[in-house]
């Protein structure tokens, strides 16, 4: 549930300069998802991932924040994530793949880390997913989701991945996020 009042950003407020925590997807699944994302929204610069902490402002010392993240992640062993079906968020028209197995662990990590210097009142409740396309009109989103469903149904490769590390990233320029720190799950 979103936090009442407080630090919520405006609906389409840019995330430039903000930080997030993600789990990158690799291998054939990432290759497929990146290609599909480019087909649906050619202006994107995809790097398949699941967001663990959505973008948020950050003004604390980076070394201290990274140490806090490592401390809070202790005891979080690696786990498997299985990707579900194509869906659309109704308010934003974002096309995404839902998460089946692994969603509970992602929620647990989100709640463990959304505190102290990284605490933020997200605009929407945390919902782990893999974004495929965004910034589309309702009509464009419906058409693109239909195409995404066709492509996903015909994809014969792996539909899951192991989460053994997380990446703390910063949005440094339009469509460009850079890795600040890699955090291993033990």
Image (cartoon, rainbow, N blue to C red):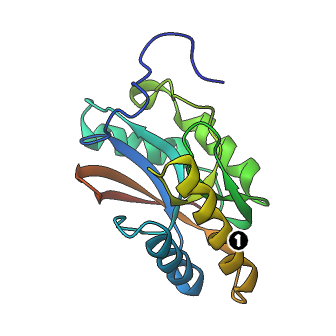
- What is the x, y in percent for residue 116? 44, 25
Look at the image and tell me whether residue 161 can be seen.
yes
Q: Residue at x 43, y 73 (%)?
A: 38
- Image vertical order of residue 125 relative to residue 52, above or below: above
- Image vertical order of residue 42 relative to residue 2, above or below: below
Identity of the residue furthest to the front in this view: 139
Examine the image and state in which quarter residue 159 appears: bottom right
Identity of the residue furthest to the left in this view: 173
Question: Is residue 133 toward the left or the right of residue 126 in the image?
Answer: left
- Image vertical order of residue 158 relative to residue 103, above or below: below
Q: Which residue is mark 1?
A: 149
Q: Residue at x 63, y 71 (%)?
A: 148
Question: Is residue 29 toward the left or the right of residue 134 in the image?
Answer: right
Element assignment for label 1: helix
Q: Nearer the viewer, residue 122 or 73?
A: 122
- What is the x, y in percent for residue 82? 74, 67
- What is the x, y in percent for residue 185? 56, 60
Q: Residue at x 47, y 52 (%)?
A: 136
Q: Residue at x 44, y 50 (%)?
A: 135
Name the quadrant of the C terminus.
bottom right
Name the quadrant of the N terminus.
top right
Question: Is residue 88 toward the left or the right of residue 31 in the image?
Answer: right
């Amino acid at each position: 549930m979103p936090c009442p009042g407080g630090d919520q950003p405006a609906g389409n407020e840019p995330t430039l300069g903000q930080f997030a925590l993600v789990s990158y997807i690799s291998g054939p699944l990432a290759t497929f998802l990146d290609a599909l994302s480019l087909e649906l929204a050619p202006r994107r610069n995809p790097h398949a991932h699941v967001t663990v902490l959505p973008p948020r402002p950050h003004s604390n010392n980076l070394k201290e924040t990274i140490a806090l993240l490592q401390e809070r992640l202790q005891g979080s062993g690696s786990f498997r994530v299985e990707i579900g079906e194509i869906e659309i968020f109704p308010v934003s028209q974002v096309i995404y793949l839902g998460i089946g197995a692994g969603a509970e662990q992602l929620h647990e990590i989100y709640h463990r880390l959304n505190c102290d210097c990284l605490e933020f009142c997200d605009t929407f409740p945390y919902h782990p997913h893999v974004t495929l396309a965004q910034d589309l009109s309702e009509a464009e989103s419906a058409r693109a989701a239909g195409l995404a469903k066709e492509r996903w149904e015909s994809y014969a490769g792996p539909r899951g991945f192991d989460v053994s590390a997380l990446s703390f990233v910063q949005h440094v320029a339009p469509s460009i996020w850079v890795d600040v720190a890699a955090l291993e799950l033990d």
